[in-house]
Image (cartoon, helix red, strand yellow):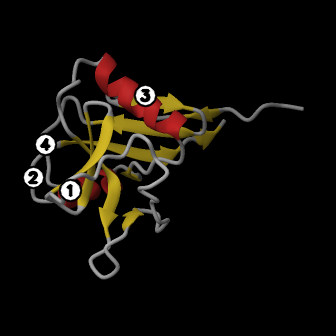
Amino acid sequence: MNDIVYTCPTTLGWYANGKYCYFFSFDVVRETWADALTQCQGMGASLAWLESSAEFKYVNDTIQNNGFLSNKFWIGGRRDVISGLMQWINGETFDVNVQPWFQDGVYVGDCMHIEENFVRTLDCANIKFYVCKKQGLVS
């Protein structure tokens, strides 16, 4: 049985992990959450949604290993304006009670970002770095 191999863009900023490709905006202009989403979509991706603690660790470690420990990076989650629940960009509800790496604390905004080992919320109009995610191509 052959293992499936996924490939990612080889341009600066893209990193591979499993079947997904991640773009970290280390070297580009910071954006609002909505503008970051538009930038990701322009690359055929979306703001990153996190499916597991292992994936959170990978994204967080990549940020830290590139010297951006205290910076904030937008990811693909936001608070639904009607229900008030956190939701991933792909439509899945984010259960804030079962993710040890999520700190909502004081309500400070509707958009998720990674900051210093945690996912937190922030006003979506802030200008931050961002992380995009898309499935790699089967090679």
Report the residue at 28% width, 53% height from top. Answer: 104
User: In the displayed structure, would residue 62 be above or below residue 97?
Assistant: above
Question: Percent position (x, y) of residue 23?
Answer: 36, 37
Between marks 2 and 4 in the image, the one whose residue lies nearer the viewer = 2
Q: Which residue is mark 4?
A: 30
Q: Secondary structure at mark 1?
A: helix
State the quadrant of the N terminus: top right
Say which label, 2 or 4, has the lower sequence index: 4
Residue farthest along the left direction in this orientation: 126
Res 33 label: 1
Q: Mark 2: few, some, or many residues within 10 Å (few <14, many ≥20)?
A: some
Q: Which of the two residues, 52 or 33, is positioned nearer the viewer here?
A: 52
Report crowding for label 3: few under 14, some 14 to 19, many 20 or more residues within 10 A (C-alpha).
few
Which element carries disc 3, helix, strand or loop? loop
Looking at the image, is mark 2 or mark 1 earlier in the sequence? 1
What's the residue type where badge 1 is placed? Trp
Query: For the residues marked 3 and 2, what is the alpha-carbon distance in whole angstroms?
Result: 29 Å
Q: Earlier in the sequence, mark 1 or mark 3?
A: 3
**What's the CA distance linking mark 2 and mark 1?**
7 Å
Query: Callout 1: few (<14), some (14-19), or many (20+) C-alpha neighbours within 10 Å?
Result: many
Locate the C terminus and report the quarter of the image it occupies: top right
Tell me: residue 131, above or below residue 27. below
Q: Which residue is mark 2?
A: 126
> Is there a contact, CB below 8 Å, between mark 4 and mark 1?
no
Q: Kindly state the secondary structure of the residue where label 2 is placed.
A: loop
CB atoms of marks 2 and 1 within 8 Å: yes
Identify the amino acid type marked 4. Arg
Q: Position of residue 134 (x, y in %)?
A: 47, 47
Q: Whole-percent x and y of residue 61?
A: 38, 24
Contact check, label 4 and label 3, Cβ < 8 Å: no
